[in-house]
Amino acid sequence: MITPMRVFVLIFNPRTENEGIHTIREGDADGKLRNKILMFESEDDATRFALMLEAQDFPAPTPEPMDAEEIKEFCESAGYEWEIIPENSNLVVTPPELNVEETDWQANAQKEDTIEDTFPPNQQPLEEPDLSDSELEKIRRKLEGLL
């Protein structure tokens, strides 16, 4: 039997109706912006990254253990990228200097402005993945089942 690989991802408002996963927005070779979920092998590394985010006045995320394959499946279904951050790797991971001004998970977030207003002028928003509400709910239940 293959043991699932446990990784740590950063979750905002864990186990609430307003839960969200931390992603990094990067441009690909074609200049298209993509979201990427970081999967840390080490809880300590995930915690350090979360503290760096908090130091940049970002809301404090919580490192949560999850199965790497579940996260990969979620990324594929949502059109996200993923990256495994090896424990104590030489890869220096630091949060980007620029944060999105409004996130999908913020409590009381007002959607009066258009999505283009939440991005710097040189960036365009990502297209929403074509997932039905039932598909998203199924993915969410799978992820919650890992906790």
Image: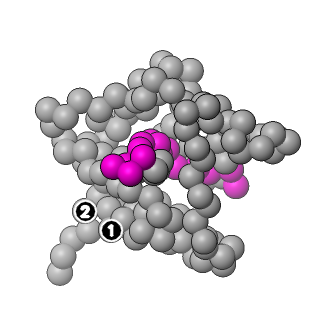
Q: Earlier in the sequence, mark 1 or mark 2?
A: 2
Distance from Cα at disc 1 to Cα at disc 2: 7 Å
Asked if residue 8 shows in the view, the reply is no
Image mark for residue 118: none
Nearest to the observer: residue 93 or residue 98: 98
Number of marks? 2
Q: Are marks 1 and 2 in contact (CB under 8 Å)?
A: yes
Residue 17 position, x and y percent, is 70, 55
The residue that appears at 38% across and 56% down in the rendered structure is 81
Closer to the camera in the image, 97 or 147 = 97
What percent of the width, then of the height, locates residue 6? 29, 58
Q: Amino acid at mark 2?
A: Met
Provide residue 40's location: percent of width, then percent of height. Answer: 30, 46
Residue at left offset 72%, top offset 36%: 117
Query: Horizontally, is 143 left or right of 125 in the view?
Result: left
Protein image colouring: one colour
**Residue 47 higher or lower than 83, as above or below:** above
Specify the farthest residue to the left: 90
What stretch of residues is rendered in magenta? Answer: 17-31
Q: Within the image, what quadrant is residue 118 found in?
A: top right
Q: Residue at x 40, y 29 (%)?
A: 95
| Residue 28 shown in magenta | yes
Q: Secondary structure at mark 2?
A: loop
Q: Which residue is mark 1?
A: 69
- Within 10 Å of disc 2 (Cα), the crowding (few <14, some 14-19, many 20+) is few
The residue that label 2 is drawn on is 5
Magenta stretch: residue 117 in it? no
On screen, residue 29 versus residue 129, left or right, reads left
